[in-house]
């Protein structure tokens, strides 16, 4: 994410081409001065006419230019002068683990660009983000660009709403309203409140509105596009967890497959044992086999598989079988049980009749990376499998109905996942059981292909996704986009683009060019009508090739090398080249 961001300035001739709701230059000066005095008055002003019930402003504090805050990527860059507003609103007693309410944070810059930025959450939420407008490593934050930034905790507090024998911080899944708030219901009230506070601060409403999030934040972006389509003019929904309940079923599937390796060796599966099911050296063998098989498909042997979707099990598995242990040599090779388990994991979760419960996963270079391994089996001398400690708890407490009360002990979570029956239990993500009035899938799944209202609003949607994401399959996102494109008669790229990132793990990391400026790409598309036909990405310092750049291409385009070695985006030969969706 190293492309230089742009501060968009709109010339008068472009005003007629702006999306719905953008009727004047967004870089116009604020209607009145906003400074420390205005910040101090904002707490009382925000209470007047508030669009949410029970609003309490706990602080409205002026932050001088140069202030740094701790966030998801460590300490932020020095921030511009701004007003930080914190508070909470709403609330209900809850059936277990309550009371619940929604907490928020908002930062309003002195030098406002006229725009609003909603910062998405992550994981199970329950914490209020830093509200700096993070949008990828190495990029200027939304606040630095002049956005007023809002974020919220989705209706529960991990420090307060915590019950040890009900999933700990996941207890909110046992409460119907708290689960719905986590899935989507807290989003629109938060948006309304953020817009209200901005209006009070600057004496006018924001003239363009963007959302940026990854993982659960990506799911939230999809929720806005599908359920609240008039809210945002542009959305970046990266690695979207829009199939979270299905992905949690797949995590249980993965755990069972890797546990089968231990059983084949005569071992009882344990959380620590899973770490050794396939060692780091053996995962490197797998990654090497994938590269040897598919790296050249894009015309360049460079450690990146740019030919999206062409590296198939039918090609990779013979290469893995060639590395199978034989005779007395048991080092530098793969056991039959390990290859078979990997084949089942990559093929996706299925019931006993072979029906898919979740998408297959791509064979990609990032399989060999720590960011893939820590989810699937855990890290040797490090954390246990995140599929167990996060996936198991979430599936039990949040994504199935009725929820199952479990402690947070990893051994108990593993035992529950190992007993999960994909014929009997997988359908519980779609069940409606009292006191719930909706299923977990209805609350949290945001995979609708009907984006007609978002398109009619003039919205633009960018969906980056790592091809080596071990949590949410990039193939699930690509399959979703294909369905959206069919629904829009081949013109979906006019308003939504999926951007596969070869080699990238979940939201970043891996041997990949994983640093790119999706926010600037969104601004160019949303405000100037320039669609992202390619986004320049740079490899980070931990990759084998720091500083390397490659284009990221909107699916189905791929980054392919020419005869002279230049890499650019091109479409498969079986696709029309008319590019109907270029604007």
Image: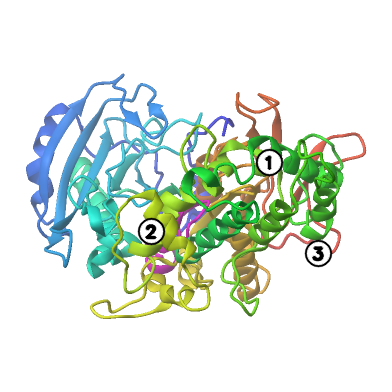
Spatial separation of the CA atoms under disc 1 and disc 3: 39 Å
Looking at the image, residue 386 sits to the left or right of residue 50; the answer is right
Residue at the right extreme of this rendering: 563
How far across and down, in percent of the image, does residue 357 sit?
56, 71
Dividing the picture into quadrants, the one containing residue 108 is top left
Crowding around mark 3 (Cα neighbors within 10 Å: few <14, some 14 to 19, many 20+) is few
Seen at 46% across and 66% down, the residue is 419
How far across and down, in percent of the image, does residue 401 sit?
34, 73
Front position among marks 1 and 3: 1
Which one is nearer the viewer's eye here, 565 or 264? 264
Front position among marks 3 and 2: 2
Spatial separation of the CA atoms under disc 3 and disc 2: 43 Å
Q: Give the range drawn in magenta.
A: 216-241
Please tell me which of labels 3 and 2 falls first in the chain: 2
Check disc 3 and report its element: helix, strand or loop: loop
Please tell me which of labels 1 and 3 falls first in the chain: 1
Any mark on residue 283, and which? 1
Seen at 46% across and 61% down, the residue is 417
Looking at the image, residue 189 sits to the left or right of residue 572; the answer is left
Residue tagged 3: 576
**CB atoms of marks 3 and 2 within 8 Å:** no
How far across and down, in percent of the image, does residue 443 sit?
36, 69
Check disc 2 and report its element: helix, strand or loop: helix
Q: Is residue 442 magenta?
A: no
Looking at the image, residue 189 sits to the left or right of residue 427; the answer is left
Seen at 80% across and 38% down, the residue is 567
Spatial separation of the CA atoms under disc 2 and disc 1: 27 Å
């Amino acid at each position: 994410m190293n492309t230089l961001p742009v501060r968009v300035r709109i010339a008068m001739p472009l005003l007629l081409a702006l999306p719905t709701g953008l009727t004047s230059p967004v870089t116009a000066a604020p209607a009145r001065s906003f400074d420390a005095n205005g910040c101090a008055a904002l707490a009382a002003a925000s209470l007047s006419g508030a669009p949410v019930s029970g609003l309490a402003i706990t602080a409205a504090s002026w932050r001088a230019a140069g202030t740094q805050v701790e966030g998801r990527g460590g300490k932020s860059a020095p921030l511009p002068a701004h007003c930080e507003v914190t508070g909470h609103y709403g609330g209900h007693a809850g059936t277990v683990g309550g009371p619940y309410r929604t907490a928020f944070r908002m930062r309003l810059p002195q030098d406002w660009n006229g725009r609003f930025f909603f910062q998405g959450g992550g994981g199970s939420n329950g914490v209020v983000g830093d509200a700096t407008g993070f949008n990828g490593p190495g990029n200027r934050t939304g606040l630095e660009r002049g956005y007023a930034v809002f974020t919220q905790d989705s209706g529960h507090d991990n420090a307060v709403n915590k019950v040890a024998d009900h999933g700990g911080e996941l207890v909110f899944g046992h409460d119907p309203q708290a689960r719905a708030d986590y899935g989507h219901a807290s989003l629109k009230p938060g948006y309304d409140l953020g817009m209200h506070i901005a209006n009070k601060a600057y004496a006018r409403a924001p003239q363009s509105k963007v959302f940026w999030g990854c993982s659960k934040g990506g799911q939230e972006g999809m929720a806005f596009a599908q359920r609240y389509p008039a809210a945002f003019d542009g959305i970046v929904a990266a690695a979207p967890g829009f199939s979270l309940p299905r992905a949690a079923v797949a995590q249980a599937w993965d755990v069972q497959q890797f546990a089968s390796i231990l059983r084949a060796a005569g071992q009882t599966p344990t959380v620590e044992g899973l770490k050794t099911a396939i060692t780091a050296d053996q995962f490197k063998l797998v990654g090497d086999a994938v590269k040897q098989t598919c790296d050249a498909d894009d015309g360049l042997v460079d450690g990146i598989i740019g030919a999206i979707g062409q590296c198939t099990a039918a090609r990779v598995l013979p290469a893995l079988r060639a590395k199978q242990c034989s005779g007395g040599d048991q080092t530098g090779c793969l056991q039959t049980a390990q290859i078979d388990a990997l084949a089942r994991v990559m093929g996706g979760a299925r019931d006993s009749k072979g029906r898919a419960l979740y998408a297959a996963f791509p064979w990609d270079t990032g399989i060999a990376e720590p960011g893939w391994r820590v989810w699937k089996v855990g890290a040797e001398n490090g954390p246990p499998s995140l599929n167990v400690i996060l996936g198991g708890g979430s599936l039990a407490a949040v994504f199935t109905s009725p929820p199952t009360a479990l402690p947070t002990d990893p051994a108990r979570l593993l035992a529950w996942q190992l007993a999960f029956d994909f014929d009997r239990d997988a359908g519980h993500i779609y069940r409606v059981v009292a006191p719930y009035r909706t299923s977990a899938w209805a609350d949290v799944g945001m995979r609708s292909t009907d984006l007609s209202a978002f398109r009619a609003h003039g919205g633009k949607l960018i969906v980056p996704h790592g091809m080596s994401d071990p949590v949410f399959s990039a193939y699930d996102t690509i399959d979703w986009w294909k369905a959206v494109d069919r629904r829009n008669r081949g013109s979906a790229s006019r308003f939504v683009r999926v951007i596969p990132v070869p080699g990238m793990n979940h939201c970043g990391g891996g041997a990949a060019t994983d640093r790119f400026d999706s926010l600037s790409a969104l601004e160019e598309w949303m405000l100037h009508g320039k669609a992202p036909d390619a986004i320049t990405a740079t490899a980070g310092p931990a990759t084998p090739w720091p500083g390397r750049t490659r284009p990221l291409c909107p699916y189905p385009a791929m980054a392919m090398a020419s005869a002279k070695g230049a890499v650019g985006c091109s479409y498969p030969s079986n696709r029309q080249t008319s590019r109907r969706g270029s604007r």
